[in-house]
Amino acid sequence: MSSRMNLIIIVGFLVVMLLSTSIFYVDQRERVLLLRLGQIEQADYAPGIHFKIPLLNEVKRFDGRTLTLDVKPEEYLTGEKKKLLVDSFILWRVSDTSIYYTALGGDKRRAGLRLFNIVNNALRDAFAKRTVQDV
C-alpha cells in the first residue's frame, strides 16, 4: 500500500469516528437534555435522530415513562386522634427535563425522596382533617 492509500484510510476512519460521535438517537420512552460545556443547550428533543458537536456537547438521558415509587405503610392520625395504617404509592413522570436536571441533577433517588416528603405531608394533613368514618 502506498502512503497515499494509508492517509485516505486514516482520514476515512477519522471521518467515520467523528460522525458516529456527533449523532445521537432519542427513543420515544426517554427525555433527553443536551449540555454544552455543562450548561443546558436544549431540552426535550423529539424522538428520532439528532446531531451534536463532539467533545463540546454531552447528552443526558432520563426515563420519560411513568415511574412508580412504592412507599412503606405509614401511620397517620385522623381528626379524632385515631391511628390509621396507610399503604400508598406514587406515580410520577419527568415533565420538564431542564427543571428536573437543574433541581435534582437528574437523580431518581433524590426525586423519589422529595416526592415522598411532599406526598407524606399532604397525606398527613388530609387525614388530620377527616374522621375514621370519612375515610
Image (cartoon, rainbow, N blue to C red):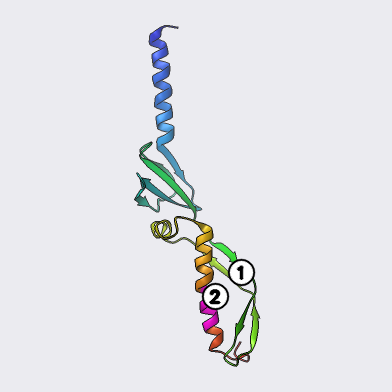
Task: Depth check: give the residue in front, 74 or 62.
Answer: 74
In the rendered image, the vertical position of residue 113 relative to residue 25, given as above or below: below
Q: Look at the image and tell me whether residue 102 can be seen.
A: yes
How many numbered discs?
2
Which amino acid lies under the numbered mark 2 shown in the image of this protein? Asn
In the rendered image, the vertical position of residue 134 relative to residue 75, given as above or below: below
**Residue 124 shown in magenta:** yes
Q: Position of residue 36 (x, y in %)?
A: 34, 45
Identify the residue at horizontal 53%, vertical 65% (top origin). 113
Disc 2 from disc 1: Cα separation: 9 Å
Q: Magenta region: which residues?
A: 119-125
Q: Position of residue 81 (x, y in %)?
A: 61, 90
Secondary structure at badge 2 equals: helix
Determine the image quadrant of residue 1. top left
In the rendered image, the vertical position of residue 2 relative to residue 49, given as above or below: above
- Main SS category, magenta section: helix
Q: Position of residue 20 (x, y in %)?
A: 44, 33
Compared across the picture, whether 123 is left or right of 9 comes to right
Task: Depth check: give the residue in front, 82 or 43.
Answer: 82
